[in-house]
Image (spheres, rainbow, N blue to C red):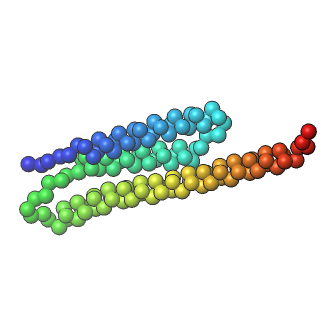
Amino acid sequence: MELRFYGLPLLLLGGAAWLALAEIRNFQAGREAERPSWSRLIRRLFGAALLVAISAMFQFADTRLPDQMPPDQALAYFHYWMGALALVGLAGILALWDVLAELRNLRSYVDRAERDELRKLHDHLKEPKP
Protein backbone atom coordinates (compact mmCIF):
# COMPACT_ATOMS: atom_id res chain seq x y z
CA MET A 1 0.00 0.00 0.00
CA GLU A 2 1.38 3.34 -1.01
CA LEU A 3 0.91 6.35 1.24
CA ARG A 4 0.63 9.56 -0.75
CA PHE A 5 0.94 12.93 0.93
CA TYR A 6 -0.87 15.72 -0.93
CA GLY A 7 0.05 18.55 1.46
CA LEU A 8 3.47 19.52 0.10
CA PRO A 9 2.42 19.70 -3.58
CA LEU A 10 -0.67 21.70 -2.63
CA LEU A 11 1.43 24.10 -0.54
CA LEU A 12 3.85 24.52 -3.44
CA LEU A 13 0.99 25.18 -5.87
CA GLY A 14 -0.55 27.69 -3.48
CA GLY A 15 2.79 29.43 -3.04
CA ALA A 16 3.31 29.58 -6.80
CA ALA A 17 -0.16 31.04 -7.37
CA TRP A 18 0.31 33.61 -4.62
CA LEU A 19 3.75 34.59 -5.93
CA ALA A 20 2.50 34.96 -9.50
CA LEU A 21 -0.59 36.99 -8.55
CA ALA A 22 1.32 39.26 -6.17
CA GLU A 23 3.99 39.94 -8.78
CA ILE A 24 1.45 40.67 -11.51
CA ARG A 25 -0.28 43.15 -9.19
CA ASN A 26 3.08 44.72 -8.32
CA PHE A 27 3.96 44.98 -12.01
CA GLN A 28 0.62 46.64 -12.79
CA ALA A 29 1.19 49.15 -9.98
CA GLY A 30 4.68 49.85 -11.32
CA ARG A 31 3.29 50.27 -14.81
CA GLU A 32 0.87 52.93 -13.56
CA ALA A 33 3.79 54.71 -11.88
CA GLU A 34 5.76 54.39 -15.16
CA ARG A 35 8.52 52.26 -13.67
CA PRO A 36 7.69 48.61 -14.34
CA SER A 37 10.43 46.10 -13.59
CA TRP A 38 10.43 43.53 -16.38
CA SER A 39 13.40 41.62 -14.99
CA ARG A 40 11.70 41.21 -11.61
CA LEU A 41 8.45 40.08 -13.26
CA ILE A 42 10.23 37.48 -15.41
CA ARG A 43 12.39 36.29 -12.51
CA ARG A 44 9.44 35.81 -10.16
CA LEU A 45 7.14 34.22 -12.74
CA PHE A 46 9.95 31.80 -13.61
CA GLY A 47 10.22 31.04 -9.87
CA ALA A 48 6.48 30.35 -9.75
CA ALA A 49 6.81 28.03 -12.75
CA LEU A 50 9.64 26.21 -10.99
CA LEU A 51 7.42 25.71 -7.94
CA VAL A 52 4.70 24.21 -10.15
CA ALA A 53 7.24 21.87 -11.79
CA ILE A 54 8.61 20.77 -8.41
CA SER A 55 5.07 20.19 -7.16
CA ALA A 56 4.27 18.05 -10.19
CA MET A 57 7.48 16.05 -9.75
CA PHE A 58 6.67 15.39 -6.10
CA GLN A 59 3.04 14.49 -6.78
CA PHE A 60 3.50 12.18 -9.73
CA ALA A 61 6.64 10.40 -8.57
CA ASP A 62 6.57 6.68 -8.06
CA THR A 63 7.33 6.31 -4.37
CA ARG A 64 6.90 2.56 -4.13
CA LEU A 65 10.09 0.71 -3.28
CA PRO A 66 10.02 -2.99 -4.12
CA ASP A 67 12.17 -5.47 -2.21
CA GLN A 68 14.29 -6.17 -5.27
CA MET A 69 14.95 -3.47 -7.83
CA PRO A 70 16.90 -3.88 -11.05
CA PRO A 71 19.92 -1.54 -11.33
CA ASP A 72 18.51 0.30 -14.36
CA GLN A 73 15.29 1.09 -12.47
CA ALA A 74 17.27 2.25 -9.43
CA LEU A 75 19.32 4.50 -11.70
CA ALA A 76 16.13 5.89 -13.25
CA TYR A 77 14.78 6.68 -9.74
CA PHE A 78 18.08 8.31 -8.85
CA HIS A 79 18.03 10.49 -11.98
CA TYR A 80 14.42 11.47 -11.37
CA TRP A 81 15.06 12.60 -7.80
CA MET A 82 18.31 14.32 -8.75
CA GLY A 83 16.30 16.24 -11.35
CA ALA A 84 13.83 17.25 -8.66
CA LEU A 85 16.72 18.29 -6.41
CA ALA A 86 18.24 20.29 -9.27
CA LEU A 87 14.94 22.18 -9.71
CA VAL A 88 14.86 22.91 -5.96
CA GLY A 89 18.46 24.15 -6.15
CA LEU A 90 17.62 26.33 -9.16
CA ALA A 91 14.66 27.79 -7.27
CA GLY A 92 16.96 28.54 -4.32
CA ILE A 93 19.51 30.25 -6.57
CA LEU A 94 16.72 32.27 -8.19
CA ALA A 95 15.42 33.30 -4.76
CA LEU A 96 18.93 34.37 -3.69
CA TRP A 97 19.33 36.35 -6.92
CA ASP A 98 16.00 38.06 -6.25
CA VAL A 99 17.00 38.97 -2.70
CA LEU A 100 20.31 40.44 -3.86
CA ALA A 101 18.59 42.44 -6.63
CA GLU A 102 16.06 43.85 -4.18
CA LEU A 103 18.82 44.75 -1.71
CA ARG A 104 20.61 46.59 -4.52
CA ASN A 105 17.37 48.47 -5.31
CA LEU A 106 16.89 49.30 -1.65
CA ARG A 107 20.44 50.60 -1.36
CA SER A 108 19.99 52.85 -4.40
CA TYR A 109 16.67 54.10 -2.99
CA VAL A 110 18.28 54.94 0.35
CA ASP A 111 21.13 56.73 -1.44
CA ARG A 112 18.65 58.78 -3.49
CA ALA A 113 16.60 59.66 -0.40
CA GLU A 114 19.72 60.66 1.52
CA ARG A 115 20.93 62.80 -1.39
CA ASP A 116 17.53 64.52 -1.64
CA GLU A 117 17.43 65.21 2.09
CA LEU A 118 20.95 66.64 2.06
CA ARG A 119 20.05 68.85 -0.89
CA LYS A 120 16.94 70.10 0.91
CA LEU A 121 18.95 70.77 4.06
CA HIS A 122 21.63 72.59 2.05
CA ASP A 123 18.99 74.73 0.30
CA HIS A 124 17.32 75.47 3.63
CA LEU A 125 20.61 76.57 5.19
CA LYS A 126 21.36 78.84 2.19
CA GLU A 127 18.09 80.74 2.55
CA PRO A 128 18.57 84.10 4.26
CA LYS A 129 16.86 84.43 7.59
CA PRO A 130 14.48 87.40 7.94
Do we see residue 56 in this rendering? no
Question: For the point 52% across and 45% down, which residue is it?
Answer: 42
Question: For the point 54% across and 56% down, which residue is it?
Answer: 100
| Residue reaching furthest to the top | 32
| Residue reaching furthest to the front | 130
Does residue 29 appear left or right of residue 69 in this picture?
right
Q: Where residue 43 appears, x then y in whole percent? A: 50, 48
Which quadrant of the structure image shows residue 12? top left
Question: For the point 14% across and 48% down, which residue is it?
Answer: 3
Pick the residue in front: 69 or 93. Answer: 93
State whether residue 83 is above or below residue 38. below
State whether residue 28 is above or below residue 75. above
Question: For the point 42% across and 45% down, which residue is it?
Answer: 48
Q: Where residue 22 appears, x then y in whole percent? A: 47, 37
Does residue 83 appear left or right of residue 1 in this picture?
right
Do we see residue 81 in this rendering? yes
Pick the residue in front: 128 or 99. Answer: 128
